[in-house]
Amino acid sequence: MNNRPIETARDPDLRLSYQALLRAAKRAREVALQTGTLIVISRNGVVEQLDPATEAMPLSVQAAVPPYLAKR
């Protein structure tokens, strides 16, 4: 596995993918708030449903591999 920061990637699409994910997450929160839909996230390997109207949304991307995706 490559441990270099994604910002140092040679591929411009890969370099900018983190910002794209953050924009997509922000837009998903906006749409969920407008439509009264819950947001489903995985936090520390636990799947959670959050109400965007009442709960603070996480603004970070999970770095660790959740247990259900770990190689066996």
Image (cartoon, grey):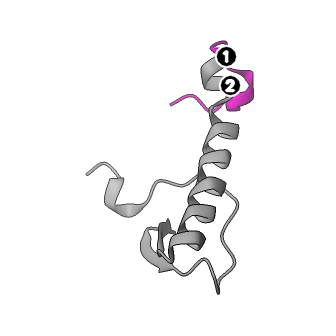
Q: Residue furthest front?
A: 34
In depth, the one of 51 and 36 nearer the eye is 36
In depth, the one of 67 and 9 nearer the eye is 9
**Residue 3 drawn above or below residue 68:** above
Residue 10: in magenta span: yes
Instruction: Report x, y in % for residue 48.
Output: 45, 77
Instruction: Judge left or right: residue 68 versus residue 40.
Output: left
Instruction: Judge left or right: residue 70 versus residue 16.
Output: left
Instruction: Report x, y in % for residue 14.
Output: 61, 24
Q: Mark 2 highlights which residue?
A: 15
Quarter of the view holding residue 55:
bottom right
Q: Mark 1 highlights which residue?
A: 12
Which amino acid type is shown beneath numbered disc 2? Arg
**Residue 36 drawn above or below residue 12:** below
Which element type, helix, strand or loop, lies under badge 2?
A: helix
Instruction: Report x, y in % for residue 2.
Output: 57, 28
> How many numbered markers are drawn?
2
| Disc 1 residue crowd, few under 14, some 14–19, many 20+, Cα 10 Å | few
Quarter of the view holding residue 47:
bottom left
